[in-house]
Amino acid sequence: MKLLIDENECIACGQCKSVCIRDNIEIGEVAYETGSNCFECGHCMAICPTCAITLKIFKGREGRIEDYNSKEIPLNYDELLAFLKQRRSIRWFKKKKIDKDTFNKLIEGAYYSPSAQNEQDVEFVVLDKKLNDFMKHVYDIIKVQEDEFFRVKEFGDYIRDNSTKEYHPLLWQGHQLILTFSTDKTSAVIANTRLELLAYSLGLGGFYSLFILKADEIDHGRLMEFFPSIDKNKHMYSAFIIGYPKKRFKRTIPHKDINIKYM
C-alpha cells in the first residue's frame, strides 16, 4: 500500500477514486486502497478537498504542497503565445556566468515536469569548470564522423588549435552547458523544455546541440565514463548551451507551415 489516508479528515466524497487510473481506491465509510498497482501519480492527493491523502513517498515533504485556484490560470493564451514568439536560439553570449542559485530556479521547471510512468528519473548535469574536458571527451567519440560532417571536422581542428578559431564550433560563445539524462527520451525533452522556458523568463538564452548528442548515439558506454555517478541505463537526450545573451532579436520571422491532419 502506498497511500496514507487520514480517516478523520476523509469525507468519502469519491473525488480520489474518480481520478485514479489504476483503480487503486474504493470508497466505504472512508476512502481505502485496493492495492491495484498504484504508480504514485499523486492525482488523488492533488484533488482531495480535505487534504486527507498523502503518498508515503512524500511523507516529510509537505512543504512542497501548494494550493492553487484551478479556475484561475496565471497567464492567458495571448500572453503565453507572445512569450513563445520571442524564443530564438541564442549563440552569442556575454562572459558573465550563471550562478548556482539561478540554475536551481531553472530546475524548478523540471521539478514539476511530467515523466513516463511517473518515474521521475530525469537527471541534470551542469558543466562549467569541466566543460572543456567534457568537450574533448565528446570529440574523442564523435571524431569517427569527421569525414561525414564538416562541423565535426571543424570541432576537431578547434580542439587541436583553438587559437586560430573565432568561436567554438559546437559551443559558439557558450561557457556553460546543461545535459539531461533519463531512461525515457520524452521525459528528458519535456523537462529540459520547461527549464528552457524558465531560462528565457529570467533573461537567459541558449540553443540545443545535436552534435554533442552524437556522443551518446555513437558510444553510450564510453560517454558515460565521464559521469560515473549516473545510472548507465540513462541516456543523454538533451544538450543545452545556456548563458546571458549578447544579442537581442527584435521580431519574429516566418516559419514553414506545420502540417496537421484531423482524422
Image (tube, rainbow, N blue to C red):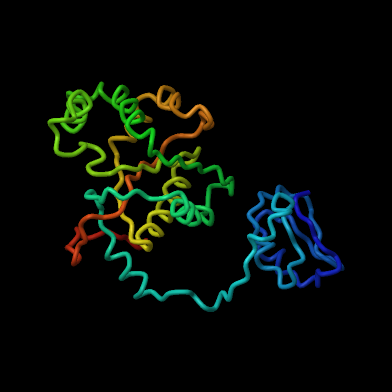
Observer-nearest residue: 203 or 34? Answer: 203
Residue 7 at x, y percent in the picture: 85, 65
Residue 161 at x, y percent in the picture: 17, 25
Residue 40 at x, y percent in the picture: 66, 51
Q: Quadrant of residue 16?
A: bottom right
Observer-nearest residue: 77 or 57? Answer: 57
Q: Is residue 188 above or below residue 212?
A: below
Observer-nearest residue: 229 or 80? Answer: 229
Residue 26 at x, y percent in the picture: 78, 61
Q: Residue at x 72, y 64 (%)?
A: 17
Q: Residue furthest bottom?
A: 71
Q: Is residue 253 above or below residue 157?
A: below
Quadrant of the frame with the C terminus? bottom left
Q: Is residue 23 left or right of residue 172?
A: right
Q: Is residue 235 above or below residue 258?
A: above
Q: Residue at x 81, y 72 (%)?
A: 11
Q: Residue furthest front?
A: 96
Q: Residue at x 38, y 39 (%)?
A: 128
Q: Is residue 114 left or right of residue 220?
A: right
Q: Quadrant of residue 61?
A: bottom right
Observer-nearest residue: 172 or 70? Answer: 172
Q: Residue at x 30, y 60 (%)?
A: 260
Q: How many marks?
A: 0
